[in-house]
Image (cartoon, coloured by chain):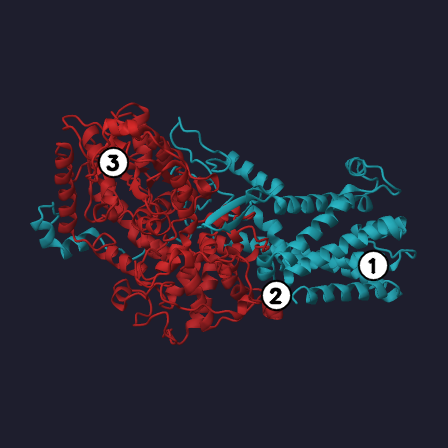
Amino acid sequence: MKPLVPLFVILAVIGLAYGGGQLADTRYLLGIVLPYAAIATFLLGFSYRVIRWAHSALPFHIPTTCGQQKTLPWIRSSWIENPHNKRGVLTRMALEILLFRSLFRNSRAQIEEGPRLLYTENKWLWLGALAFHWSLLVILLRHLRLFVEPVPRFVIGMDTIDGFLQIGAPQLLITDVVVVAALLYLLKRRFTDRRLRYISLYTDYFALFLLLGIVITGILMRYFFKVDLEGVKQLALGLVTFSPTLPAAVGPLFFVHLTLVSLLFAYFPYSKLMHMGGIFLSPTRNLANDSRRQRHVNPWNYPVKVHTYQEWEEEFHDKIKNSGLPLEKE
Amino acid sequence: MPEATPKPEELVQINYDPHEKDWRKTRPEFRKGTFCHAALPKDVKYLGLPNPRDWQPPDVDWKLPPNWKEIILQGMKERLEKFRSFRLFMDICVRCGACADKCQFFLGSGDPKNMPVLRAELIRSVYRRYFTTTGKLFRGLAGARDLTEDVIKEWFYYFYQCSECRRCSVFCPFGIDTAEITMMVRELLNLVGVNTNWVIGPVANCYRVGNHLGIQPHGFKDSIDFAVDDLEEITGVRVEAPINRKGAEVLFIVPSADYFATPHYYTLLGYLMLFHEIGLDYTFSAYAAEGGNFGLFSSHELAKRLNAKMYAEAKRLKVKWILGGECGHMWRVVNQYMDTMNGPADFLEVPVSPFTGTRFENTRSTKMVHICEFTSDLIYHNKLRLNPSRNDHWKVTFHDSCNPARGMGLLEEPRYILRKVCNHFHEMPENTIREQTFCCGSGAGLGSDENIEARLRGGLPRANAVKYVRDKHGVNLLTCICAIDKATLPTLLEYWTPGVDVGGIHELLGNALIMKGEKERTTDLRGQPLQQKSEAVHA
């Protein structure tokens, strides 16, 4: 079973971190050394990957056009789906990155007797993906309250909106519910959809289990097993100011959370999670369909062997002549 | 169609849910009807490509060069640096599965390796093994696998069951384009001499003679002259069709099937009528007698070598600009590659329609206009007299060809013309047209007879959408602007959706075009009797 291997890995990490969170030496390792190492790996690895992509040449302008091109003035062109200028490209990219525009097109095909192919609306993947990514972003920004003193106003405002249901104390944050639900949905797809199960790799499950581990430990700390927030903040501020101190009263659950987060950061550049950076560089989306209007240069364009007109005329000279077509050389 | 071809009832037993456990453990079976034959050594040699030899895909020994693995890995390394698309698309797929049921080859076969995501994993797994740290360290756990001869065979099988149509890339949240990946793998296969005859044969012909079919200059002239005679019989008007004439304003380039195959031929008649009627100062070329570019289906280099003829000939003939006929991948090349590969075309002028004064700003650099852009502009400015009722015997639908749709965005121009030249036009369902159009299943060099089963499967979604409008609106003509469509859709429709013919936009334009001095038309360009007025009432 594919999901089992990554599941055991994550569980083992959790076990180790839980144990390590209780011993002074390992607390230092997990609380200070590991986060620094993880962040360094993330920053270096992420930049390396992006630079690597950017370093690959962009020989041709190959946007996938998803609407009418800009041609004659009386034909309405689809300036976002088939952009012809920078404004169109930026809008198209914004829609892709912020709203997952292409995924919104998703449909599901079925074949019935007849045969009859049916295509039905299928927005669940889009919804699940959007819910996951946006709530993760909000949760990430929420953590700023640990790293910045005084807490930025937008973070406080965000939490007020997030907690508008006003259930329980501490207030239930909607993003916490949404992120778990979305992750479980994304995981469920990989289990129940036969096609998806077939294409999934170990690493696909690994990423999902890792993220689930992070959000679940986070939720446990917020709502059930309260941690010493002051202590956490002391550590966080210490880390960002490069003068880390280990607080005494922070429980092992926190160390599990922190270890999983560190793992995520360190794993990020080596994984498919790099789609976060890659989406900005996708040449089928971030180029304008203007290659007839404007010449683009291929940096490695090289001369090739061609069959010239002169060679052609020489080879077929008599036939050209007999058919009465004009010749360069009689 | 070959006799052994399965019946539609048999072919349609398709299951979209894979039942095997692990795709790494399955191998393609080179069964008759599912693959194309190998390229002939003489063609490979003529083009100066590597490893010419006698071999066929079902052979156990493909006679690869001894250092084949090194060649492939070196080729990958080079291409990862030369094509950002390649490196990026190897890295960022998350296997969300949105593309899985968007490919016509998957929808028609249920073969899981025809899901775009898995087609790409066939090479991605090799990329991970040799080009990523995690793949080198963790192998299978990181989704990596070794490059073996079986992998080469699998690549050949599945990357010649992709028509580079780009439909999957419309749905991919990162815009991953399998066409790019297919192009890369075909280039790699080409490096070790794994090519198909249906691609390399036409490329060799086009390179040497000037068109895919290898029609020599006098044969080309004969077919054009034949069309001129034919037209005189149908319309009573004698048109001129100059070839290799220096100093014309426009060089006109069409896919070679237009002058050598039906139903393309009727589209050619339409062009000739149009140019005569408006008095266009143009010329064909017997040297650049091919709009299509099968080089694109093998490597960027071959695409460039063939495409070079267009600008070279335009320069030699001293024309002002170039006009291109109805062809699919020709327009992918012209729109996205030509100027970069063989430009700048600074010896040409920005195309201006001599009849409407329209300056085709969108072609300012390439200087090449699509015939549908040209004609719709004429109609918009009322330069043509049209009688759409001469097409009343047709109930028409329009099939967007992949490349003009997803590599260009030529969606409205052909529809505008259609609405002006016929009275009965019906669109196919929304998910099957425009940017979501389905391929004919034979593009990118797959339109051969030997792989008929694969083609019929790949064509099922298109044919099924045609069936919908046939049954609902009585559609009996599918129009399109691609020579491969015109060549392969008749077989496909006859098999899946009998009773629907295939034609071009300019064929219908020719039917509707009222020419000065024409005799009363009794037949359309196909020689079919025009619908009588009384019949029209009954219908």
Residue for point 22% across, 57% down: B208
Q: Are marks 1 and 2 on the same chain?
A: no
Disc 3 target residue: B320
Mark 2 to mark 3 CA distance (whole Å): 56 Å
Quadrant where the C terminus of chain B lies?
A: top left
**Chain A's shade in the image?**
cyan
Q: Position of residue B116 (x, y in %)?
A: 50, 55
- In the rendered image, the residue lying farthest to the right is A249
Answer few, some or many: residues within 10 Å of disc 3's Cα (few below 14, many 20 plus, some between 14 and 19). many
Quadrant where the N terminus of chain B lies?
A: bottom left
Subunit of mark 3? B
**What secondary structure is found at the residue carrying circle 2?**
helix
Disc 1 target residue: A255
Mark 3 or mark 2, which is nearer the start of the sequence?
A: 2
**Chain B's shade in the image?**
red
Answer few, some or many: residues within 10 Å of disc 2's Cα (few below 14, many 20 plus, some between 14 and 19). many
Q: Which mark is residue A66?
A: none
Q: Which kind of residue does numbered mark 1 sit on?
A: Phe
- Does A174 sit left or right of A228 as displayed? left
Q: Position of residue A98 (x, y in %)?
A: 62, 40
Question: Residue B6 or B459: which is nearer the viewer?
Answer: B6
Question: Residue A98 or A66: which is nearer the viewer?
Answer: A66
Disc 2 target residue: B142
Q: Position of residue B65 (x, y in %)?
A: 37, 74
Q: Are marks 3 and 1 in contact (CB under 8 Å)?
A: no
Q: Which kind of residue does numbered mark 2 sit on?
A: Ala
- Does B296 sit left or right of A45 as displayed? left
Q: Which kind of residue does numbered mark 3 sit on?
A: Lys
Label 1 or label 2, whichever lies nearer to me, is: 2
Please count the marks in the image.
Answer: 3
